[in-house]
Amino acid sequence: MSISIHSISKTFGAYTALDNVSLEVPNGSLTALLGPSGSGKTTLLRIVAGLDFPDPGPSSIAFHGDDVSEVSARKRGVGFVFQHYALFQHMSVAQNIAFGLRVLPSGQRPKKSEIRDRVLELLKLVRLEGLEGRRPHELSGGQRQRVALARALAIRPKVLLLDEPFGALDAQVRKDLRRWLRQFHDEIGLTTLFVTHDQEEALELSDQVVVMRNARIEQVGKPQSVYDQPRSPFVYEFLGNVNKLQEGKNVRYLRPHEIDVLFAAECDPATDVLARVYHLFSAGPIATLTVKLEDGQFLDVELSRKQLDELSLSVGDEVAVRLAGRTA
Amino acid sequence: MRHCSATSESAWVRRLLIGVAVTIISVFLLLPLAAVFAEAFRKGWEIFLASLHEEAALSAIKLTLIAAGISVPLNTLFGVSAAWLITKFRFRGRSLLLALIDLPFAVSPVIAGLVWVLLFGAKGWFGPWLELHDIRIIFALPGIVIATMFVTFPFVARELIPLMETQGSDQEEAAIILGARGWQVFLRVTLPNIKWGLLYGVLLCNARAMGEFGAVSVVSGHIRGETNTLPLHVEVLYNEYQFSAAFACATLLAFLALVTLGIKSAVEHLTGHQSSNHQ
Amino acid sequence: MQKRRVIPGFSLSMGFTVTYLSLIILIPLAALFLKATRLGPSEWWEILTSPRLIAAAKLTFGASAAAAVVSTIFGLLVTWVLVRYRFPGRRLLDAMVDLPFALPTAVAGITLTAIYAPNGWVGQYLEVWGIQAAYNPLGVFIALTFIGFPFVVRTLQPVMEDFGVEYEEAAATLGAGRWIVFWRVIFPMFVPALITGFTLAFARAIGEYGSVIFISGNLPMQTEILPLLVVSKLEQFQYEAAAVIAAGMLMISFVLLFLINLLQRRLNWKNH
């Protein structure tokens, strides 16, 4: 079910959280709302869920063409996973997951046995079989995350919304869950919108990235296009490491991996500049080099270990640096 | 415990301080407690029981129970309502409301009783009207109940508000998104989360309701056997120099205090839940 | 402008809360002030400067302040011991601190009198030294210290419990002796909580009735406290005079309440 967002604005007193934001989320996609804190992404997510309301105006939110702007959060049929999971502390995992089904009006409520089956089915889906009797405080962060997900899915939502799903987890758990979420999404095919401030996460996971900043959308596109063809310095800087080279009046933006390092003797004045190696970090799959140009500016360069070995550099060596970036 | 660390006093200073503290608490707090029971049993077990079975005493106990039985549930209802309002919503006047809830704590019990006399007493606002309809509030049960409600008004709210503030609204929002209606959210999600705070609040509210003296004294008229709660009955007996009887009734109240503290301690110990504050 | 809210129950809780609050608290207090204004300013002046009231006020405020000071000192010591040391019976002592708070005031009143009266448990020893503890201001002071004590301890306790030992360690590594560490490093951090505790104890003390009227003797001009004066006026059907005195006491209470709220908010910001 697609999500269509039109002209949403939201102010909290003097503070503008969203400024006339419009967005199309295609059916079945995994879309990331990416941006720094204060960019409005969580506010937008909550408005889509119905937990918050846009300022009065020509705004609308539609799921698969049906306008849900006036529909209460209770009836929107949205699955929402909170940043800190918001699991019901005094209920077991099974009771948490079953909650959405048990509060249905008696006409629509499934039989107890059906509810139980669905709970077990969902536990299996999120790979937490056997934990149905546990309480939330007995679970790890990653497990709580998955219970929250199962709970949201129990009501067969039209769309799935995730607020910083991996924010509260350790680095390793985060990586594992990321992989898992992508697989999971491919399995169930539910339209999913998630909020994150981690660009790596957004680029790795999503079908569509929405870069937000200061209450507005800066750019929307596939991860590849947003990364390779950023429309503004902000997007460029936010999505990866950046070098900013002052050339006269212009600023030239360069990714560390877009810079080549050659032997000083091979320096071609037309395209290269001379520099000295200032700092070298090579404990890892990629070597990071900091070079100091003649005019005193610094550049960060990324090389593969192989390239580094071929050059056999040490701090203080003179090298030639070939730039292939873009001018702002 | 003989070690001397960088952040601790020498052993003898410690012992001295502990000794002084224990002495202070013993003389100051435990001594009065012991005295209540000692004085009550001074004339022996039989006199003790007789005092409690005396008609005026029994009716005083009954009145105390009724007053508490009405004011505590009502104030609990208020406490829950006010806590829900204040912690789940933001609105203009919220801070004012919070301050107003604390008001009875700042008011002398005597004034808490006085205001009702000014409203419903013979020369009060509604005095003539009540006279006309032959309704007695002051010097009767309703007055006692209302005065008790005034002084015990904030207890449940003050216990719940910090608790619910800390818990936030995430779980309630989650429940709503999952399709729960208002009452379902409250009963299934909020209430279980606040049950210990609710217990503490009710305990403290009840202890104060049963033990209230000043406010009730002003509105009751001290009509023996009719409008004396247990604390007032203690005063009456004392002023009549029936010391043992007075202390006998006092032990009931002291016992109530100990039970309240005991339950509170036990719950804190067993569940690790602490009371929100002590006011 | 109807504001949409996600969480339900706003109108219901607002309606009930405000109605209940008005009926139980606001309207009665308003009635008090209205009654007090029945008299003109000159009569106000007469009542508020009458010798009997001044004597009662001196006793009430004086004893309350002194009691609050002593409560604070005792409270600091006891809290320190309870929080920082481990010894048998500590838990029991900790629970007992709440006793004056949980014990009905009348019970406290008659018991304190029994203890400090000339033939009482402690009173008989004081008698030997010529100190009379009951039926005079000293008795009032003792009773007020009793009831103020838990306020200081319970306000100070969370602050002390949260107190990071790093400060002491830092001072110690810089070479400070234990006494200096206490006065220069530790104590200043407790001052806000102590002030709050003091104010709470003071505010409670000036309105206290039940704990005090048994031990004080209640002689007008000598051992009469302000709340008793109000009751006295009431019993003589001098409603307006009672209202005036009560209104005055209320104003002071409100100022103190405001102060306490301010202090507690500052305290919470500092500690959380």
Image: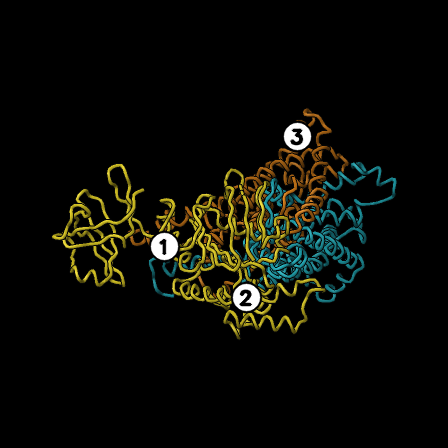
Furthest-bottom residue in this view: A130
Q: Mark number for residue B193? A: none
- In the depicted view, which residue is nearer to us: C6 or B5? C6
- In the depicted view, which residue is nearer to us: A200 or A151? A200
Furthest-top residue in this view: C42
The correct choice, above or below, for A313 with respect to C238 in the image is below
Q: Residues within 10 Å of mark 2 (few under 14, many from 20)?
A: many
- Name the subunit of mark 1: C
- In the depicted view, which residue is nearer to us: A253 or B168? A253
Residue B190 sits in which quadrant? bottom right
Residue B184 sits in which quadrant? bottom right
Sequence order check: which comes first, mark 3 or mark 1?
A: 3
Assess whether mark 1 and mark 2 are in contact (beta carbons under 8 angstroms). Answer: no
The correct choice, above or below, for C141 with respect to A204 in the image is above
Q: Is residue C118 visible?
A: no
Q: Position of residue A190 (x, y in %)?
A: 53, 62
**Residue picked out by circle 1:** C166
Q: Mark number for residue C50? A: 3
- Disc 2 secondary structure class: helix
- Name the subunit of mark 3: C
Kind of residue at badge 3: Ser
Colour of chain C, in one word, is orange
